[in-house]
Image: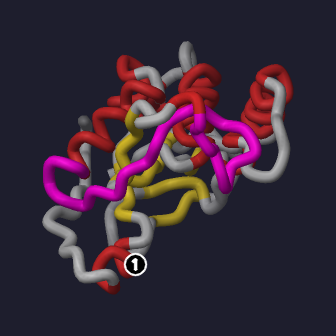
């Protein structure tokens, strides 16, 4: 099952592992757009995404963790209006974003910038579904729900190592 139209990119298409998901052989990771090491003005973030698109990039990898939601917001803004068959997005589940308990004393670290959300690890079925739903909201649901064909359980080994159990791993198709 192709996730992207064959004529949407000049990059070679490849399956992911042994799955039938066909994607471009490279992607743009959006972590830096979440302002990990330096602040990134909105116009620079959008220009970066535009330059990648103009260069043929049609596979984008993001996460709610990147800038505590900022990278997903920026990617969703950029993809609004693009044909959903022209790109594919992967994001991670298992981290939900919440209003800080103490907004006045909120610490964004390790992010230099980003949004003011506390992050909770939750790899239960409900937590995975909540983080997926939050991602669709940040990625502009009407566009992203159809293009976001796969979600990734990120750092599941760390969760298992600390004694918590991963209750659900999802492959979301045609959400």
**Residue at left 33%, top 68%?**
19
Residue placed most toward the observer, 37 or 128: 37
Viewer-closest of 162 and 18: 162
Residue visible at 37% across and 31% down? 136
In the displayed image of the protein, which residue is found farthest to the bottom? Answer: 161
Please give left or right for residue 39 compared with residue 35 in the image.
Answer: right
Q: Residues within 10 Å of mark 1 (few under 14, many from 20)?
A: few
Picture coordinates of residue 172 (x, y %)? 25, 48
Magenta-tinted stretch = 105-127
Instruction: Determine whether 44 is above or below 92 in the image.
Output: above
Say if the magenta span includes residue 93.
Answer: no
Regarding residue 69, the answer to whether it shows in the image is yes
Q: Is residue 110 magenta?
A: yes
Residue positioned 38% across, 36% down in the render: 98
Return the residue at label 1: 158
- Quarter of the picture holding the C terminus: top left
Residue 50, given in percent of the width and then of the height, sits at 77, 28
On screen, 168 above or below 116?
below
The colour scheme applied to this rendered structure is: secondary structure
Picture coordinates of residue 66, whole percent (x, y): 59, 47
């Amino acid at each position: 099952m192709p996730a992207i139209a064959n004529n949407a990119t000049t990059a070679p298409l490849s399956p992911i592992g042994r799955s039938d998901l066909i994607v471009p052989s490279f992607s743009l990771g959006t972590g830096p757009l979440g302002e990990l090491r330096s602040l990134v003005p909105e116009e620079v973030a959008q220009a970066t995404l535009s330059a990648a698109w103009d260069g043929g990039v049609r596979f984008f990898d993001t996460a709610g963790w990147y800038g505590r939601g900022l990278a997903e917001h920026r990617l969703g803004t950029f993809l609004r209006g693009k044909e959903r068959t022209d790109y594919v997005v992967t994001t991670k589940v298992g981290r939900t974003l919440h209003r800080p308990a103490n907004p006045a004393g909120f610490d964004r670290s390790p992010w230099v910038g980003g949004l003011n959300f506390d992050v909770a690890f939750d790899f239960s079925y409900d937590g995975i579904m909540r983080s997926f739903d939050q991602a669709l909201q940040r990625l502009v649901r009407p566009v992203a729900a159809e293009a976001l064909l796969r979600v990734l359980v990120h750092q599941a080994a760390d969760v298992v190592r600390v004694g918590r159990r991963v209750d659900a791993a999802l492959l979301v198709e045609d959400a």
